[in-house]
Amino acid sequence: MGKTLGFISLKGGVGKTTISAAVATHLANSYHKKILLIDANLSAPNLGLHMGIVSPQKTIHDVLNGDHISSAVHLQYGVDVIPGNFLNNKELNPMLLKDKIGHLKKNYDFVVLDSSPSLNEEMLATIIASDHLFAVSTPDYPTLSCTIRAAQLAKQRHRPIEGIIINQSHGYYDVNLEEIQESTGIPIVAKIKYDEVQHMALAERVPATLFAGKTPLTSEVDRFCRSLLGLPEKTSWLNSIFARRDEKLERVNRAVLAKSFYRGVFKNDR
């Protein structure tokens, strides 16, 4: 039985959809996993654009309105994608999401949900439908306060956030990772440096991990994906010796995440 990964944020512009698409395509193309990627941002969907799907015939909106979910699946970049319809004007019940995807989980290794960046029913639907939640945040105080609020909401629903992915890190002016971890009570599992590749990839409507070769983004997404698969991290002996303090912190957190995923995802499915 596959597991559902929910990527959430309470602030737009942090790169949540970029990360969702990158993780999904990397798991599919680098590790040959069967992935279903769903746009759960119903009020302002844009995942399709990240995946090169501009005018889909059927979408998650049609599914929530009663169409069979298989009719909305589009194969793109090795990933099964259910995009959204930004022209939709029909009333929807986001809370149907969990039931709609439930029977499909047996066909996939992972179902990836890209949530709404707002505190609304759409985000709540993603939280409830997910087996594992990850928050995407930028390393600044306004976004950090939103991440703390998201963590509180998830905890109230007994779906605690298992890790924070820091995106668009600039270095010197960033909030310290240890401070973020202490303030939120959530481990940092990845830190992705600011990279123009994210914007260039979106302009070409290609997932960032497929747009260019080895980049800081691709390397960090790979480390995160390996933890989801319960695999040891690839680290050179030189890097292990001279790694910065925040890199060591991430590495420890990913190792813990890898162990929990190995126990929860793989051992229980045998």
Image (cartoon, grey):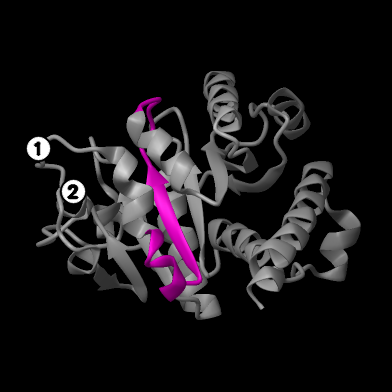
Tell me, yes or no, whether the highlighted magenta stretch contains residue 113: yes
> Callout 1, which amino acid?
Lys
Write the residue at 40% across / 25% down: 119
Tell me, yes or no, whether the highlighted magenta stretch contains residue 108: yes
Residue 207 point in image, percent of width and height: 38, 61
Q: Relative to residue 135, is residue 231 depicted above or below? A: below
Q: What residue would you read off at disc 1?
A: 90
Q: Quadrant of residue 216?
A: bottom right
> Callout 2, which amino acid?
His
Q: Which residues are magenta?
A: 102-120
Write the residue at 56% across / 45% down: 133
Q: Which residue is more in the foreground, 130 or 185?
A: 130
Sequence-wise, the earlier of marks 2 and 1 is 2
Residue 45 point in image, percent of width and height: 25, 43
The answer to whether the residue labelled 2 contacts the one labelled 1, judged by CB atoms less than 8 Å apart, is yes
**Secondary structure of the residue carrying numbered label 1:** loop
In the displayed structure image, the side of residue 218 where residue 48 appears, left or right? left
Residue 220 point in image, percent of width and height: 62, 57
Circle on res. 41: none
Q: What residue would you read off at disc 2?
A: 61
Please tell me how crowded label 2 is: few (under 14), some (14-19), or many (20+) other residues with Cα within 10 Å: many
Write the residue at 61% across / 31% down: 155
Q: Which residue is more in the foreground, 198 or 181?
A: 181
Write the residue at 39% across / 48% down: 114
Q: Is residue 13 visible?
A: no
